[in-house]
Amino acid sequence: MTSPKTQIALLRRRNREVPDNRPQATLSEVFAVTPADAAATGFALAHLRGVRGPVLWVQDHLSRREAGMPYPAGLPFDLGLMHLDVARPVDALWAMEEALGCPALGGIIGEVWGAPQVLDFTASKRLAIRAEAHGVPLWLIRRAASPDLSAARERWRVASLPSWQNEDDSRAPGQPVWRADLFRARWRQPGSWVARLDPARGLIMDHGSEGAASESPVASPVSSPVASPVLVRHG
Amino acid sequence: MAERARRITALWLPRFAIERWLVLAARRGEDVPPEVALALARPGTHGPVIHATTRAAELAGVQAGARAVDMRALCPVLRLEPADTEADSLALERLMLWLRRFCPWTAVDGAGGVILDTTGSDHLWGGEAAMLVEIETALSHLGLSAGLAIAPTPAAARALARFGGVRAISGADQIEAQIAPLPVAALGLGADTVLLLQRLGLKTIGDLAAVPRLSLARRFNRTPAAENPLIALDRMTGRLPTPLDAPADPPRYLARTRLADPVQDPTPWIPALCEDLCAALTHDGMGARRITLTLYRTDGEIAAASVATARASRDAAHLARLFEGRLDRLDPGFGFDLITLVGDVTEALAVRQRRLDGAADDAEDLARLTDRLRARLGPRALTAPAPRPSHIPERAVTWAGHAAPLPASAPPVPRPLRMLDHPEELRVLYAVPEGPPAQFVWRRRPHRVVRFAGPERIAPEWWADKPGTRLRDYYRVEDHEGHRFWIYRDGVLGDGRGQEPRWFLQGLFV
């Protein structure tokens, strides 16, 4: 690459001036294994911990009816929230694309139900390039959809796992854990992790055995709370 | 009675056209002495006709409405000037708006008449009589002579101003006595009806009122409402309401484009219109909060679209973008030939310096995004959560159009990340009397409860809920696949409020 031709190219180059040639913000997709499972929401939200500006939450009508609305009292951390309720997937895509051009936003969470015609490879590529150009992360939550062709830089499949042992009450659910399956990624190796949101340290992903109620979060060798999750490869 | 409380002031400017001409002549430096017979002429079918006369000309026998050549034969020294009726009506509208210094509600009433609703505003001038003197003095400073009257109904005030005494004031109980001596022409009917009434021997309104209502109604039952003397009489006495329409203030910021030929698509003209509007706004240091685009169609209809901004703006490019996607829904009919863009709501907007490092202003960027999303998707699509003091979970938050600070502290009890719009009923397969169900079916899938926490009892709010609303016992449950739900039992067995309690699922935990 010689010299940036367009403003977008300029912005992309500036954005990529981080090690590993990776933009700070991009388009990521999270597929919920079960439609009515808040694990995908929690996983996407965990990546937006500590962002500067408010988060725009775009939902199409079907997602809202099937999986409900975000509930501010249940947010795991303080977050400025704006909610956009749209009727059609095409409106959701337009709104996300429009909002990606606003660097004052801390991030966008989009929910599109199923696999509408408008959400094709071109549409996802537009979203990805725009997110990288303006430095606004976009997490697209997909439900009842098969992972077809998409330009999303990271594609996750997230499901709930049985929660950890609750120290105060053995019968009660403990800290929630999820199985996060990165099945397609542009800048790193795909893999499978057990993820959890630690209130103090942010998103932690390791290779704990499923339902590892005995493992303590302190015993985990990773301990840096960063916006992008820490990945540990065992063996 | 509300009708009784109304006080209407009527103004009658019998020589408005000629007095306006005299004022303009004096402004030009031409002095017209009062004894000069002067008349204004407007074009008629058979040559010019007299439009308005001075008092000197009237004494010489010149009548308005007569042909100018006849009047010149009658009065050879008559000086004729062309009348400008359009400018007269525009000047009358300006005078009507100027008269809002006396009361907030004024309307033009025919040629040379103005109606003021002075209900409750007379005390500012020291009573009704003093207010009339004040208005008359103010008008005489403008060089206008006027007849004034106050009455409870517009029709009576109009009649008294034209035919009654000097500065007549009529109370609600004296209205019939005061209008009785006025001629029937004061009813405001057409010349044919007035002639008919005079031939019937009814010279005054008192004569008309003395006739039994039934006879009048029978005699004029085929007459249209505008010409019916009984209806006119009832409007005057207040038996029938008189609808009147006061025009709104003219817009201060308006940009318009006239098109030579009717077109179907207004899009190419929007940027230029926005720039014109923003130039005017910049000149005054104002910003628009709401602007309306109006298309004047060739078939006599109008189509309009409004957009609003979250904070005052005079950025032409931003305002133009707000109309994207809105113009498809406007029906252009057979095309339109006039486009106007009006700044309906404007606010003072000081010039602000952008940050020196060129970084964007976060609040302004967010406001622009808000505008665009709302303009395209509707004003209610974009919301922000606002807390409400309530224990009922679905009432503890409202989604309002503006952002409100949420309490920073985390709630003492866990709450789900997602809430369903409406709680969904569960089919419970196996339940113990106290405690959560061991297994339930939700959306046709069975869920076996492995772990649970609760109950958390939330009582209904007696001040907001219907009587008979049952308390809720909330449980956090986790099923065998690890899904965590928030379910509740509506009531307890034996609380005397209905049948066996039902189970609902309301939220999803992460």
Image (cartoon, rainbow, N blue to C red):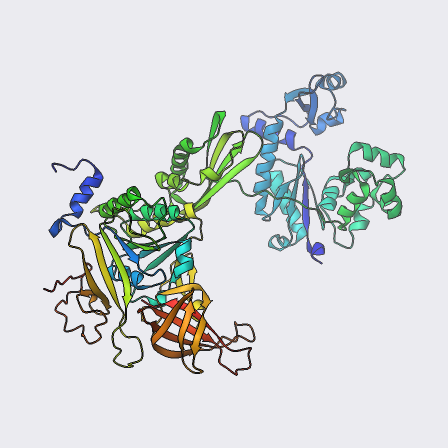
Q: Tell me if residue B349 can be seen.
A: no
Q: Quadrant of the C terminus of chain B?
A: bottom left
Residue B306 at x, y = what percent?
47, 43
**In the picture provided, is B401 more to the left or to the right than B6?**
left
Q: Tell me if residue B333 can be seen.
A: yes
Question: Which is nearer the eye, A155 or B178?
Answer: A155
Residue B206 at x, y = what percent?
85, 45
Question: Which is nearer the eye, A97 or B131?
Answer: A97
**In the picture provided, is B2 more to the left or to the right than B328?**
right
Question: Which is nearer the eye, A38 or B334?
Answer: A38
Residue B282 at x, y = what percent?
37, 40
Is A35 drawn above or below residue B51 in the view shown?
below
Is B100 drawn above or below residue A80 in the view shown?
above
**In the picture provided, is A224 more to the left or to the right than B354?**
left
Where residue B219 sits, quadrant-wise, is top right
Q: Quadrant of the N terminus of chain B?
A: bottom right
Where residue B13 sits, quadrant-wise, is top right
Is B60 drawn above or below residue B411 in the view shown?
above
Question: Which is nearer the eye, B421 or B5?
Answer: B421
Residue B505 at x, y = what percent?
42, 69
- Outermost residue, left side: A235
**In the picture provided, is B506 more to the left or to the right than B83?**
left
